[in-house]
Each structure stands twice: as C-alpha cells, then as structure tokens.
Image: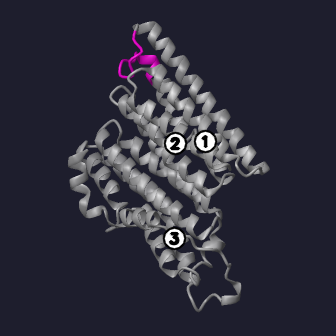
C-alpha cells in the first residue's frame, strides 16, 4: 500500500476512536465509529485476494448493521427524552444499544463474523481489529454500564466464555485461535461490567497488552498456522519461548499477567454473593485453557531434536523493540496489578 494512503488510514483510525472517546453525544460517537469502520476496510484489502475481499465485505455488513441499530436507537431515545447524552437512556433503548455495541465487539452469540474476518486479513490488520477497533465500542459500553440489564450482561458474558473455548479447540489457524481468544476475554469483561466497571477497564487494558504481544510475535516469525509456529524454534528460539509464555498468560496461569484479571473477577463475583456464577465461569474457562495448553504442547513437542533442520521453514525474523516491550508487559505486570487498579 502507498505510504501516504496508509498514513491517512491510520490517522483516520486514530481520529475516529478519539472522537468517540471524547464525545458525550450519541451522534458524534456514531460518527467516530463510522470513521473507524471505513478506515480499516482499505487495510483489510491491501492484498487483493478473494478471501480478503470476502472478509472486508463481512466486516462492513456487520458493522453497518450495528451502526444503523445504534443510530436508530439513539434517535428514538432522543425523541423520547429530548436529550442526545450518552448517559441518559430510557429503558427500551438501553438493551438495543448494548446489543449493537456487543455486536461491534464480537461477543457471542453475535460473534460469527469475527473469526472469519480475522482469518481472511493480514496479521497486521488482525492486530488492529483485535485491539484498536475494540476501544471505542468498549468505552461506550463502559459509559452505559450502570443502565445495562444485568441478566443480559451475564448471559452474553457466559455465552462468550463458552463459545470462545469451544470454538478454539479444533482450530489449526492461529488467527482463528486469536479470534476465539478475543471472544472469551471479552466475555470475562462483560460478565463483571455491572458489578465493577473499573475492573472491566483493567481487564481490557491487560487484554490489549497480551493480544498485541501475541500478534507482534506472530508477525515477527510470519506464522499463521500451528504447523508453522511449531517449526520456528531453530530460527528464533527465544521468541518462541516467550510466545509460549504469552499463551500461558492469555490462559490466565499464575504468576503471569493474565492471572490477575481472572483472579480479581472471581473475587469480585464471590464478594457479590454470586458463587454459582463464579463456579460456572471458572469451569467454562477450562475450555479456553485446553487450547492454549494445546498450542504450548505443540511447540514443546517440536523442540530439537524432534524436528530435523531440513523441514524448517526459512522465514525472515523481524524482531523489534516494540515486540520485546509488549511481551515483557504481557508477562510481568502481575506484581504491579494493585498499583494499576489504584490508578484506574
């Protein structure tokens, strides 16, 4: 892609998200979401492949449907209340706006577009779609969290955790694995949204860090399949080792970064006297743990001398300071969790 065009698209992404973050008005928030949607589509189709065109079409139709629902609901709400304020919603339109934002995020059962779209686009665009594109809808959802129906959030959260685990079990494509990982993590955030929005924000920030670290690592070794990642050890053993640890962090194993949000969410659920919900959530998260451990197991089994040098793929390893920084954060933030929570 032309560097000037790429710069314009990235600048539009930044402007769209910033506009949504700074707005107190539903119309301005909707305009920011639309700028975001339109700016990422050229990035999806920068390699003119039928799969990329299909992914961009699916993404556009899904996001356009969610945006139309947001605009219609906000208009009807303004007609009823006389206000366009984001935090002033009447009862029927809170649910429709929440569902539209969850559709934009890719929460189950409105998640079917996300794995297919991420599978059809380059890793760099998948990184933007899994991290930056989630910021604006999640911010709006946080702002209306006190008005959202608790039963809806619990249902969507549990369904997303289950679907994120079930969907990722039999995948061989790393981009689809990351898509189902995203669905599962968003389920944890939505589950606690009504009880403790600050904890949802903390979880979201750590999710962005860990997902970015994983995508940067995959981009460094140019791997999109499990078979490719398993043969990368002879080329970059340190990077593959840190990738294994990032996967375990995404799984939520102590003492890595991913353990802190899960621990705090379970403690918060227990504090709210919802022990059954906490138990079901922990059991459902075992499905996701299985496919993370499966990926790690595949890497361990293919360490030398199990794989002959002749079968390794010759790919250029592009390590960068950003990859190292994100990986470090994705592994070592756990001891600093109380400090971050105090700041939030």
Dominant secondary structure of the residues highlighted in magenta in the image: loop
* x 55%, y 42%: residue: 106
* x 63%, y 29%: residue: 64
**What distance separates the C-alpha of mark 2 from that of mark 1?**
9 Å
Q: Badge 3: how crowded within 10 Å, few (<14), some, or many (20+)?
A: some
The reply to whether residue 54 is in sight is yes
Does label 3 or label 2 sit earlier along the sequence? 2
Observer-nearest residue: 66 or 170? 66
In this rendering, the answer to whether 170 lies above or below 186 is below
Q: For the C terminus, which image quadrant?
A: top left
Residue located beneath label 2 in the image: 133
In this rendering, the answer to whether 236 lies above or below 39 is below
Q: Is residue 317 left or right of residue 270?
A: right
Residue located beneath label 3 in the image: 319
- The quadrant holding residue 63 is top right
**Cβ–Cβ under 8 Å for marks 2 and 1:** yes
**What distance separates the C-alpha of mark 3 from that of mark 1?**
25 Å
Q: Badge 1: how crowded within 10 Å, few (<14), some, or many (20+)?
A: many
Per the image, label 2 sits on a secondary structure element best described as helix
Any magenta on residue 337? no
The residue positioned farthest toward the bottom in the image shown: 305
**What distance separates the C-alpha of mark 3 from that of mark 2?**
25 Å
Can you tell which mark lies on residue 253? none
Q: Is residue 104 left or right of residue 336?
A: right
* x 42%, y 36%: residue: 153
Residue located beneath label 1 in the image: 40
């Amino acid at each position: 892609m032309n560097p000037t065009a790429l710069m314009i698209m990235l600048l539009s992404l930044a402007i769209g998200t910033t506009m949504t973050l700074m707005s107190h008005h539903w119309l301005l928030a909707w305009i920011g979401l639309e700028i975001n949607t339109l700016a990422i589509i050229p990035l999806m189709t920068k390699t003119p492949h039928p799969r990329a065109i299909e992914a961009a079409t699916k993404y556009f139709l899904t996001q356009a449907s969610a945006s139309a629902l947001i605009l219609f609901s906000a208009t009807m709400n303004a007609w009823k209340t006389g206000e366009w304020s984001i935090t002033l919603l009447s009862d029927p339109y809170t649910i429709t706006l929440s569902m539209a934002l969850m559709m934009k995020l890719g929460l189950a059962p409105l998640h079917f577009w996300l794995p297919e779209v991420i599978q059809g686009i380059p890793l760099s665009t998948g990184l933007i779609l899994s991290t930056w594109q989630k910021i604006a809808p999640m911010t709006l959802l946080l702002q209306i969290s006190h008005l959202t129906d608790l039963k809806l959030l619990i249902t969507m959260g549990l369904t997303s955790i289950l679907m994120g685990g079930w969907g990722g079990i039999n995948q061989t494509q790393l981009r689809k694995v990351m898509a189902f990982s995203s669905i599962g993590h968003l389920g944890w955030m939505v589950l606690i949204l009504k009880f403790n929005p600050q904890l949802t924000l903390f979880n979201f920030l750590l999710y962005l860090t860990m997902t970015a670290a994983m995508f940067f690592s995959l981009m460094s070794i140019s791997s999109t399949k499990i078979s490719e990642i398993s043969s990368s050890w002879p080329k970059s053993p340190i990077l593959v080792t840190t990738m294994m640890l990032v996967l375990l962090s995404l799984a939520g194993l102590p003492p890595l970064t991913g353990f802190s949000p899960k621990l705090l969410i379970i403690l918060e659920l227990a504090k709210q006297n919802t022990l059954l919900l906490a138990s079901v959530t922990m059991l459902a998260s075992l499905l996701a743990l299985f496919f993370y451990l499966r990926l790690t197991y595949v890497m361990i089994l293919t360490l030398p001398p199990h794989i002959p040098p002749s079968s390794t793929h010759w790919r250029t390893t592009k390590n960068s300071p950003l990859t190292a920084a994100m990986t470090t954060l994705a592994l070592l933030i756990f001891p600093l969790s109380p400090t971050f929570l105090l700041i939030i």
